[in-house]
Every structure is written in structure tokens, then in C-alpha cells.
Amino acid sequence: MDVMAKELIPAVIVGVIGAFGVYWYIKFRFILPLETRTRDISRAFGLFTVFSREVLDHIYIPDSIEHYGDITNHYLIKLHKIFPESSMLVFENSQGQWRLINYLKNFKTEPRLMTVYKWGVFDKAAGDSEIVRLENISSSSDAGAAGLFRTFDIKAAMICPFMHSGAQAARLLLFGGARRDFFDTAEPYLHFLVSQLNAVYKISEKVFALKKDNDQLKSELDAVVRELNMTGSRLIQRAKERKALYEVVTLGAGDEKDIKAGCTAIMNVVARMMDADVVACLLFDEAKSELVVTPGSYGISDDERMLYSLGVSNTASSSVRAFLTKRPFISADAQNDPEVITHYAKLWDIRSLMIVPISLHSRVIGVLRVGSRNKGVFTQDQLEFLSVIADELAILIEMVTLYENLSNTATELAQLNKLKDEFLSTVSHELKTPLTTIKGFVSVILSGEVGPLNEQQLNFLGVVDQSVNRLTHLISNLLDLSRLNGKVEMEFSAVNVKELIKNSVSTMLLKAKEKNITLASVADKSLPSVHADTRWIIQVIDNLILNAIKYSGPGSKVNVSGHNKGEVVVVCVEDNGPGIPVEEQKLIFDKFYRCKASVSQVPGTGLGLAISKSVVEKHGGKIWLESKPGEGSKFLFALPVAKEKGEGKGQ
């Protein structure tokens, strides 16, 4: 045993030494490099995490391109701290050339650089919008670019396009150095940085546009304010009577005042302040191509006003010349002035005369004519002041014109609408009587009471009977529509919607079977009553079910349901027909509108849904459609739940 032990000990020692050697071989050959690589990756990931967090923390939306440049500089400074040996140059596209707008590089002495470069690689990178690697920069097609790279000691670089405007990038970031071993390390940073800059710029473009619009509006507003201030200053500098006139104009144009009375007040005040005997406003009548005296003028009777009108082709008139040339006119003695038509001066017994154009937004709409029976009364200062009054008067005249146009249009529309309703009601009533007679006699003939009919006669009379039914239905719809457009009285009460659904489905079962369509209904157990008129709501449900049957093919299913939604009850009519195109859904409730695909295949008037919409809205409810082409349609309407004291009559 001792001998064996002595022999084994050296073997064990050799084995241990061998295992120890193998362990350290594996340690140095495989494990230590992996640990070193893991630490390097962990450190690189940590640096990238810190960098990305700092970038994200500094995100804000710039309000100008200069601020966007500040954000870019901030990001590049952060990146340069991680890659201090690198050079970073930012170029901007300027009329087909690339202008150097910024760079990061530690120079002991700042170099003298060109600012504009032309290099095809830049153009390609901007167009492709991808990061381009330049692994060996030895020369360039542009001597300036080659000199730039020598100055920055750039032998390898990556070109990163950003700030996309349309199909091209407006700026480039050139990230370079003396070696290309930084490519793999720097590329994730550059991808992240460029994506952030692009995202910020995409939002900033909208901000820039809004700011530009805002600045333009502000500039226009400032111009208006300056103009108002100048006008106010001129008025303040005038005498007390002129300030009083401005106050009268303001009061006359106020929301609670009569605009016409405001114009008349101005005429009266002008006459009092200038000691005038006549103050008239002559507006241009486009239809007659004449200047016509408006009502409310001072010192002119209605008979005299009707006698005075001037064609704008009559350039012998001082009023016409002032209108056409936009220049004021003054005369010390109009009855003896060759530039004035003597007839009109004598007609109004005028000696001194002032005429100023009335302008609105650089458009002359008439003239203001002021006269006195005395000679040499008016001065140039008064003429200038009258021009200020004309500016204020123009605004009031425009308001009068707009007000009258709106009033006339509203009156005409109301009359037309009334005539339309009366016509529909009258025609519908007149048609109903002969249709009833036709329907009765056709039914008698079809029943065989007046003698036997052959097959062709039966077919013809059947067509007549169906046409009478369709016409009767159309007339009923027109009458309903006419009543709904007027002040129709409705008998409101607490209505059981579940019963209405059940009755409507029972009524429509035969029509559904004729087309081989399955018609079913379901309603929530706790379905509350609604505040409604039974007759009108049944018509709504019937219309929706009838539409679903008409537009669904054989073998389809139509389901009617009622749901308790708290404050309202929702009724839904659902089919699995062809559905309604999205572009037509917003028109489906319009009067006489019918879907294009079925207008020639399915008979109808296009009034059912319009009537249903009007009925539901008069009940304080809402009706809408949910549909996808090929997946059927849902027509839904909601009615308010009946309150404890909700019964009664309403309109």
C-alpha cells in the first residue's frame, strides 16, 4: 500500500497541476475576454442610456429655426463629450450648395474655413435620407471639401441627413475622425440623434407655420390698431364739436341702436357743425349705374330726392368725378362754377359745396355731398374733416346694406318655404281623392264583381294597383313631411317601447316572408317607458324595418332591439344586407336622397329616413347610422325616458 501511495501522489500532483493549467488557460483564453467585452458593452450601454436620457430630457418644441439650431447644438455638445476626438460639422442646403453653419472640434487656433461646398456625396445622402459611411476619404470632387477634411484631420466619416423638408434633407451632420474604428460605436448614437432631430422638426414645421400666421395676423392687427389710433388722434385734436360727432357715430353704430338712425344722426350733426343747409349721401346703384340720393339725407324732401340721380358716365358732374377719381371737391360758388352742373346746384339752392368720396376697403361706394346757401363758407380743414366722417359713414352704410340684404333674403326664404309647404299640402290633398277612387274601382274589377278577367288584364290591373299604392305612399309621406316642417301637434305620453317594437314586427312579418327574410325582435327586460307620440314613433320603427327588408337580399336577417341606456332608450334595426358606402352615409337622412347602387333596383321615394329624423328630433332624441360596406347596417334612434310628470301635449 505504501508503495502504491507513493506512486499515486506524483500522478495526483501532475493531474492537479494540469487541471490548474487548463483552468487558467480557459480563464485567460475565453472567460476574461468575455468578461472584458461584457464590461465594455455594459459601459457603452450605460453611456448610451445617459446620453439618450439627457437628449430626451432636453426635448421641447422650438418656435423658430434658430431655436431648432440651438437644440441641435445642445445634442452635438452632449455627443462630443462621449466622442471628444471626433469632428462634427453641420451643413445646410443653400441653393444647391452646402453651407457650413456649425462645427465642433478642439482647435488651438481657429482655422479659416470656406463656408460653401459642392460635393455629390452630400447631395446623394440628402436625397436617400440614409446614414452614409465614408471609410477612406483621400480626395473629393470639390477642392474646398477636400481642404476642409484636411483641416479637421478627417480620414473617415459618417454623413447623417436630418431636418427633412419634402423629399430632401435640408441639413447634414458630418461625424468624422482620423480612423474609422468609431463607426460601430457611434452609429447607434447618430441614429438616435437624427431620429430625435427629425421628430422635433416634423412637429416644429407646424409650429413655424402657425407662428408665421400668428405674426402675420398680429402685424395686420397692429396695422389696424395703428390706423385706429391715428384716426382717434385726429379726432381728439379737433374741436369739441368734432369729438361729439365721433361719439354720435359710435352710438349710432352700437349693437342696441338703429343703424339707419345712426346714418341720419350723422347727416344732422354734420349739418349743425358746418352750418350746412343740405347734407346728402349718394350711393352707387350698380343696376342703374347711377349715383342715387339715399333716404335720411338732411335738407332734402323725398320729392327732391327722387329728382336727383346721376349716371356715372356724366363726368361733367362734380359728384361723378369725385366718385370716379376718389378725390374730394370743394367750390365757393357752385351756381357759377364751370366744374359743377348749375342745374342741380340751383335745384337745391346751393352756393358753397363740398363733395368727398365714401370708400370702404379701397372701394368707392358713393359720395357725401354737403352744401350751403351762402358763398365761400367751407374751408380745406372742413373738407379734410368731412373725409374722416365719410370713412365712418362707409362702415355704417355697409352695415345697413348687409342688414337689408339679410332681412330680404330671410323674408324671401320664409315666404318660399311657406308656399312650398302650402303647395305640397294642397297638391297632396287634391291627389288623395282621385287616387282613393282609382284604388276602389281597381279593387272591384280585380275581385271579379264586374265580370271575369283574362290573365293579361289581371296583370295590367295588378300593376295599376301597385302604382296607386306607391303613389298613395308618396303622398302620405309628403303630407307627413309638410306637417313636420310646420307646427305639428303631437300627443305625448309615457309609451311602452317594447310593445311598439312587437306591434311593428308583427305588421311587417308578411312583407319579410314575401322576400324570404327572417324578422325577429328582442328587448331588455327592464325597458322603461319613453316620452313620445305613439303614432309617430310607430311610423319611425315601421320605416326603418321596411327599409331593412327592401334593401336586404333573400335569406337575410333583420333584427329589431330595444336597450335601456339610463336616461334614454335606444331602438336598433339591424340587417346583414350590402351596407352603405361611407361617402353616402352623411346624405342618407336628406330628403329624396337614395343610395346610388340601389336607386334603380329598389323602389322608394327617399322620404322615409328624412321623416324619421324629423320625428325623432321633435321628440328631443337623436337618430344615426352605423354601417360598413358588405357588413350590413344598423339604424339606431334614442328617445328620452319618460319622467314622472312627463305626460301631456307638446309641439
Image (cartoon, rainbow, N blue to C red):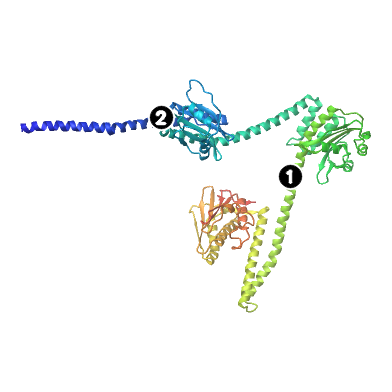
Q: Secondary structure at mark 1?
A: helix
Element under label 2? helix
Residue 567 in picture, x, y percent from top left: 54, 47
Image coordinates of residue 151 in percent, x first then y, are 49, 26
Residue 526: tell me if it is visible. Answer: yes
Q: 95 left or right of 248?
A: left
| Residue 507 placement: quadrant | bottom right
Nearest to viewer (mark 1 / mark 2):
2
Tell me if residue 578 comes above or below residue 256 in the rendering. below
Q: Which mark is residue 47?
A: 2
Query: Which residue is at the front of the view, 509 or 371?
Result: 371
Of callouts 1 and 2, which one flags the residue occurring earlier in the amino acid sequence? 2
Estimate the x, y position of residue 290 in percent, counting from the top left: 84, 43
Type of amino acid at the residue the image marks with label 1: Leu
What residue sits 65% from the left and 64% below the top?
472
The relative height of residue 502 versus residue 317 in the rendered view (above or below) is: below
**What is the distance, in whole Å, between disc 1 and disc 2 at their CAs?**
70 Å
In this image, 104 relative to 406: left or right? left
Give the class, few, some or many, for how many residues have Cα within 10 Å of label 2's Cα (few <14, many ≥20). Answer: some
Residue wearing tag 1? 406
